[in-house]
Amino acid sequence: MELFKMAKEAMSMRSKVKEMEKALKAKIVDIDYKGIKISMNAKNEIVSLKLPEDFGKNSVKDMEKYMFSAMQEAIKESQKAMAEESKKLMGGMNIPGLN
């Protein structure tokens, strides 16, 4: 009987993981850093990137610095969204790496 219960729990967990993957992909965060606009889903996948018209007028060093900072901010916001969605979907389950 114990083996059947474990198999049932594993199937339930797989279903929740699929549901969570779908929710994370759908949850989009938008950041705007010095005119650089990045949309990223809660799986840390970039959905869109837009640069301001005058971005090329900056020095290469400044452009690199601005892009780096914008990406860092987008990743941070994406990770917050991932944690929030994970809490909602997993109902307080303690899963390493998601809390």
Image (cartoon, rainbow, N blue to C red):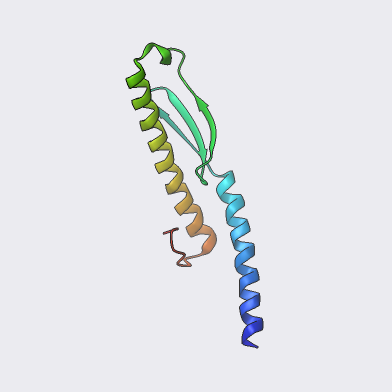
**Residue occupying image coordinates x 63% and y 69%:** 12
The x, y position of residue 74, in whole percent, is: 43, 37
Q: Is residue 49 above or below residue 1?
A: above
User: Which image quadrant is residue 68 in?
Assistant: top left
Q: Quadrant of the C terminus?
A: bottom left
Q: Is residue 99 above or below residue 48?
A: below
User: Which image quadrant is residue 33 in?
Assistant: top left
Residue at the limit of the structure toward the front, as seen here? 60
Q: Total of numbered circles in the picture?
A: 0
**Residue occupying image coordinates x 44% and y 47%:** 79
| Residue nearest the viewer, comparing 63 with 15 | 63
Q: Is residue 80 above or below residue 17?
A: above
Is residue 80 toward the left or the right of residue 42 in the image?
A: left
The x, y position of residue 30, in whole percent, is: 48, 34
Q: Quadrant of the N terminus?
A: bottom right
The x, y position of residue 62, in whole percent, is: 33, 21
User: Which image quadrant is residue 15 in?
Assistant: bottom right
The x, y position of residue 11, in whole percent, is: 65, 70
Residue at the limit of the structure toward the bottom, as seen here? 1
